[in-house]
Amino acid sequence: MLKYKKLKKGDSVKVVSGKDLGKQGRILEVNRDKGRVLVEGVNIVKKTMRKSQENPHGGIKDVEAFLDISNVQLICPKCKKSTRIAIKEADDKKVRICKKCNAEVE
């Protein structure tokens, strides 16, 4: 069974806890097995790079790291607020619904 079905790649989210509290970004990747999300421009860490043909000098690079999925909330495209999500069935399809304005989230 897949867990964490409420967030998808491309959704706009807001960080609700941790060092990047209040930052917003788009989801680049979702790892449902571990319950982690990769958000654009959030949770930047330094990573040491080995020497290679593409990077002949090596060095230190800033990259985005995964966040726990419980530390982000979806931003509703209609009401522009961070909100929880409900899943309802409509016409034999599962639809995500904003808890604040009851709008369908695509």
Image (cartoon, grey):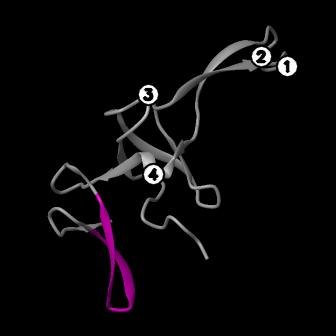
Rendered residue at 58%/34% (across/down) = 65
Q: Which residue is mark 1?
A: 52
The three-letter amino acid code for the residue at tag 4 is Ser
**C-alpha span from label 2 to label 3:** 30 Å
Q: Residue at x 22, y 65 (%)?
A: 99
Q: Which residue is under mark 4?
A: 70
Residue bounds of the magenta highlight: 84-97
* Alpha carbon distance from label 4 to label 3: 14 Å
What is the CA distance from the residue labelled 1 to the residue labelled 3? 32 Å
Tell me whether circle 2 and circle 1 mark residues in contact (CB < 8 Å): yes
Q: Is residue 55 magenta?
A: no
Q: Which residue is mark 2?
A: 55
Q: Mark 2 near mark 3, Cβ–Cβ under 8 Å?
A: no
- Near mark 2 (Cα within 10 A), the count class, few <14, some 14-19 or many ≥20, is few
Secondary structure that dominates the magenta span:
strand
- Going by the numbered disc 1, the residue's amino acid type is Ser
Could you give the CA–CA distance between mark 2 and mark 1, rounded to whole angstroms? 5 Å
Q: Position of residue 101 (x, y in %)?
A: 14, 64
> Which residue is the site of mark 3?
19
Amino acid on which the number 3 mark rests in the picture = Lys
Q: Which is more N-terminal, label 1 or label 4? A: 1
